[in-house]
Amino acid sequence: MCTENISRSGLLVAWHGDAASVPLPSIGQILTVEVELPANHGFGKKCIHCQGVVSRISENGSDGPRIALSVNYMDFRSFHDRIRAVEVMMPEATSWMA
């Protein structure tokens, strides 16, 4: 995913990738997204942790869909290679989500 636009109340995300491996969300679905911020040498890596509701999905041909979120929670956090933590949790998460 790639963040295209962000404000205090909304987030627009370009949904890149294979729809078979990462299915598109549906309108009304709650998503949690972490937006990695550019590194600053005085501080460690940071991210914006957002939770929001999918408010719009637009299909733009070959560029892929755009997902608009209405953000209801936003927090700045340290970014400690959270991708690896999610990958470790994924088998457990999918077992109870099925």
Image (cartoon, helix red, strand yellow):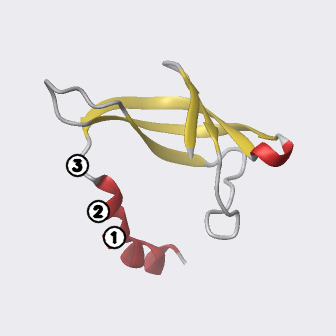
Question: Residue 91 falls in which quadrant of the image?
Answer: bottom left
User: Which amino acid type is shown beneath numbered disc 2?
Assistant: Ala
**Residue of label 3:** 80
| Residue farthest along the right direction in this orientation | 61
Q: In the rendered structure, which amino acid carries the disc numbered 3?
A: His
Q: Residue at x 53, y 37 (%)?
A: 52
Residue at 65%, 47% in the rendered image: 15
Q: Nearer the viewer, residue 50 or 35?
A: 35
Mark earlier in primary sequence (1, 3): 3
Dot 3 alpha-carbon crowd within 10 angstroms: few under 14, some 14 to 19, many 20 or more = few
Q: CA distance from mark 3 to mark 2?
A: 9 Å
Q: Which mark is residue 85?
A: 2
Q: Which mark is residue 98?
A: none
Horizontal and vertical percent position of residue 5: 58, 25
Image quadrant in which you'd find residue 10: top right
Q: Are marks 1 and 2 in contact (CB under 8 Å)?
A: yes
Calculate the distance from the C-alpha at mark 1 to the C-alpha at mark 2. Answer: 6 Å
The residue that label 1 is drawn on is 89
Element class at badge 1: helix
> Which residue is located at x 71 percent, y 39 percent?
66
